[in-house]
Amino acid sequence: MSNVVLFTIITLSSIGGASAIILYFVAQKFKVFEDPRIDQVEASLPSANCGGCGYAGCRNFAEAIVKSENFDGLFCPVGGNETMKNIAALLGRQAVEQEARVAVIRCNGTHQFRPRTNHYEGAASCTLANSLYMGESACPNGCLGNGECVAVCTFDAIFMNLDTGLPEVIDDKCTACNACVKACPRNIIELRKKNPKDRKIFISCVNTEKGAIARKNCSVSCIGCGKCVKICEFEAIHMENNLAYIDPLKCRLCRKCAPECPTNSILEIGFPAKKEKPTKTEEIAIV
Amino acid sequence: MLKTFSLGGVHPKENKISAHKKIEVLPLPPVVTIPISQHIGAPAKLMVSKGDKILTGQVIAESGGFVSSNIHSSVSGTVLKIDSFPDPSGYRRMAVQIQVEGDEWFPGIDTTPDLKKDFIFTSEEIIKKINTSGIVGLGGATFPSHVKLSIPNGKKAEYLIVNAVECEPWLTSDHSLMLEKAEEIMVGIRIMMRALKVEKAIVGIENNKPDAIEKMCKLAASEKGISVVALKVKYPQGGEKQLVKALLNREVPSGGLPIDIGVVAFNVGSIYAAYQAVQKNKPLIERVVTVTGPSLKSPSNFMTRIGTPIQALIDAAGGLPGDTGKVINGGPMMGKALSSIEIPVVKGSSGILVIPESESHRHEVKSCLRCSKCISACPMGLEPYLLMSLSERNMTDRLEREKIMDCMECGSCSYTCPSSRPLLDYIRLGKGRVSQLIKARKN
Amino acid sequence: MSILTVSPSPHTHSGQSVPKLMYGVIIALLPALAVSVFYFGIGMIIITAVSVISCVIFEFLFQKYLLKSSPTHLDGSAALTGLLLAFCLPTNIPIWMVMIGAFVSIGIAKMTFGGLGNNIFNPAIVGRVFLFISFPAAMTSYPEPGQWWKYLDATTGATPLSKMSESLANNMTVGEIMNEMPSNMDMFLGKMMGSAGEVAAFALILGLIYMLWKKIISWHIPVSILLTVLIFTAILNVGNPDKFPTPIFHLLTGGLMLGAIFMATDYVTSPMAVKGMLIYGAGIGIITVLIRSFGAYPEGVQFAILLMNGFTPLINKYVKPKRFGEVKHG
């Protein structure tokens, strides 16, 4: 072997060896002791780092769980009850359960129901449009349609329907992590209890203006008439600021309120179509 | 060499097409809608109810605190309705709608046009009169003037600066006011000097108003302590900080106010309103509004009663042109685009700009070229391209360190960007997030 | 009247656009192009046309088929890269070599980083350096001026810079070497061997004046580069006039003028704050002088610019523009 090659091999090997030895001792001296259970807990988490638990990423959440003595205020909405059970088994603690929830868009002001009175041309940010003015319609509480909720979702569970101008949630993908709820400057999105077959009954409106004005600007707005409040047998609906609200924890999905609403503001999702009662003329024809 | 500010600045086309139009008094409309919040600070508290008979100049809503302002009726008549009406904020807010009947003034107000030169009031009396008369900054900021006149303990005012710059393109309300009411303005300046207890006042006027400069110079020559300075035409010379820098070569410290360096600045329209308030007991119920635009039949300057619907002004200027794309409350750089013209003129409405459809749309956004033209344009020495980039990525801590709160939202950056990037949009978003951060930190 | 448009302020625009800036620079290069065509004839026309057309076509192909985004090949930036690349090449290289250079400039130095606005290194220089290192023989033989109808078969010779560096290595003194060089006026007017666009200092300076007038670039980078080179070569020349050529010689030869005025001032790869631009320019000047005077290559501008391009993000991070109302502590 020529001198150059030999010299190169010896030099590089020595540098490599010396570095390895130095790094080993430095790693030993500056080693930070960490509870090995943190790694175990982190492994059982979904690793989405979405912040839905309220902590900065899955590792931070795992540290908080191991540090605390119980599960107070600690729940991973993405992994759900299954994940929390696994973690409880790991740490030898009692598991906690929470109702599954899903994000619900409480505005039905499509182009058809809520006419557009102007054209917005700023940056596609709902927060910006909200601070500028009411929006492309005359309803100051309605969905602005710029898609900030779509942009923050890390699970691809929400998309903008370009025909209606409103966002739509894909229930199967939604993990109720709360990101879209926080992003919406008009508090239109709410996390509501997830029912079997993804059924939902809710007032699809957050407008608090007086009925006559709300109705003028959107044909499916809640006008605060109170008929739904009266008809509910379970006292699940209450009225505040000209706006009705159905409590998802009290609602039994009996479907009595929806037909009462004069503006069709209450949406029933996931139910079979109601059978039509035969009219008098049809009865006569049968005979 | 004309004085100017050293950092940044842009040169939009001036378009002062209504500059030589004499101020026309707009006839009273049939109905006025007066919002109870036309100023920075707490909204005023309602003092009237439906059906009440009102006189011109009567208080209809009382100041809601120290940083607030009285709202006066600009007409005489009957209260039609008290409800939420669309106003220049972009939302519907509480306003008093009055059916106009005649023009009967509240007792004690001097409605004669005679010039009253002398005054005997003390500083405290002047500040009180300005407070009760509902005077706010008429340059557009609408900050209650009595608050600015109340110098905090430990600080002392040395100069009064009169902002007659009117750097926004198209607007000529201050210009026309100076041409017709220069003597009254001089009295107003002396009144404000007494209120502030200062010996020196400087009037800053951009060089594209030579007739106004000449008139004011002539009058100032016989006034002790008042000087008039012509400034280079550059936007945003009318910004308070830029004006102080150009006239006195002093920089208002970051996060501070002009009083920190011994200066208080007022718009020339506010000074005229102060003259009316102190010498004539006349509250702020009308102002000069420029109605202008390339397609308008007769762009003009109108003396308008507060609460007049904008539709009335546009009709008086020849009607809304068929090719209208945007209607702006204010100038093209900092004004607010309206979603409908069914809103009233308020204290801060310096002008209505009607832009044709062909000029109403933004260009396609391209990627940042890193050409640094936004940095050269920024009068506050910021880096708009960086602020937009950080804002898009929600890096709020770094935004605060990069001094985003110094931004005065003048629009020079977006105006200059060759890639038509919405720089100011994202900077505004960033500012909102940083203010929330600062508020959360205080708690 | 259709419905009103609402957007946040400002509601007006200066009219400045990317094509206006890019085509403005191309116009500024036209005097140099004209002079080069005058000296190098058909060779210049061929390589310029091939370079510009290849760059535009490659940008279109990359954007449409690889990146699947809307093509912006006509905004002038690809054409400008093509023109600048052609200006750095000898006018007698074959067409396929020019196309490889265009491919590297657009495809590797620009598109892989994310397209316009995202590249770290000046694309034209990267293409030039690639060709220089891959085809050293072809890239270092320059045609003599005046052969209008000769392209690939032009008679070649060495540039003043390479001749100077060779002769110095052979222990001739600067004084002796200068007798065999074209006169200063000849060099100023471009009558010497060199790359297509770098020869005529006066034409390039005309371009600089045009760009300053149209506010396309500011004076800071070209002036800081040329001033730094002037000062350092003056120091060296005064120190040892036999070993180090005069400042005038340095300023007029090689790609310094072209680099200082058109390459280093590329928006994307140069710093944004004024102080940063001066530091960047000084860096380029110093490195150029070091390479030319002490390095293995006779010409150092291309490497100097690439090295300082690498520093640009660091300069942008730490060198901030002057703030208004800066509160001084202490």
Image (cartoon, rainbow, N blue to C red):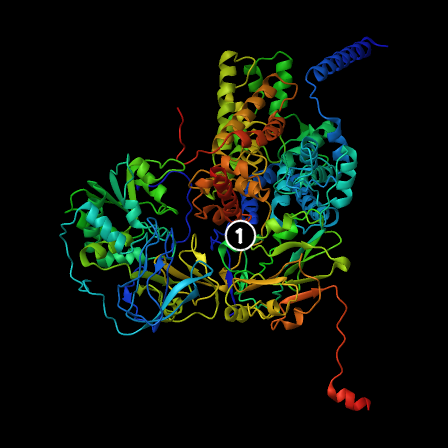
Residue B212 visible in rendering = no
Which quadrant holds residue A49?
Answer: top right
Q: Chain of mark 1?
A: A
**Residue B390: where, in percent of width, then height?**
56, 40
Pointer 1 local density, CA inside 10 Å: few below 14, some 14–19, many at least 20: many
From this viewpoint, which residue is outermost toward the right? Answer: A1
Q: Secondary structure at mark 1?
A: helix
Q: Quadrant of the N terminus of chain B?
A: top left
Q: How many marks?
A: 1
Which residue is more in the foreground, B322 or B45? B45
> In the rendered image, is residue C160 in sight?
yes
Query: Which of A177/A283 is in front?
Result: A283
Residue B94 drawn at (x, y percent): 41, 62
Q: Is residue B13 left or right of residue C306?
A: left
Where is residue A208? Give x, y as percent.
Answer: 52, 62
Estimate the x, y position of residue B367 in percent, counting from the top left. Answer: 60, 46
Which residue is painted at 47% across and 54% down in the image?
A: C12
Along the viewing direction, whichever of C196 and B65 lies nearer the viewer? B65
Residue tagged by mark 1?
A128
User: Dividing the picture into quarters, in which one does residue A57 lie?
Assistant: top right
Relative to C103, does residue C234 appear above or below in the rendering? above
Vertically, is A229 above or below C277? below
Q: Amino acid at mark 1?
A: Leu
Residue C291 placement, left or right of B312: right
Q: Quadrant of residue A283?
A: bottom right
* B259 sits left or right of B364 in the view: left
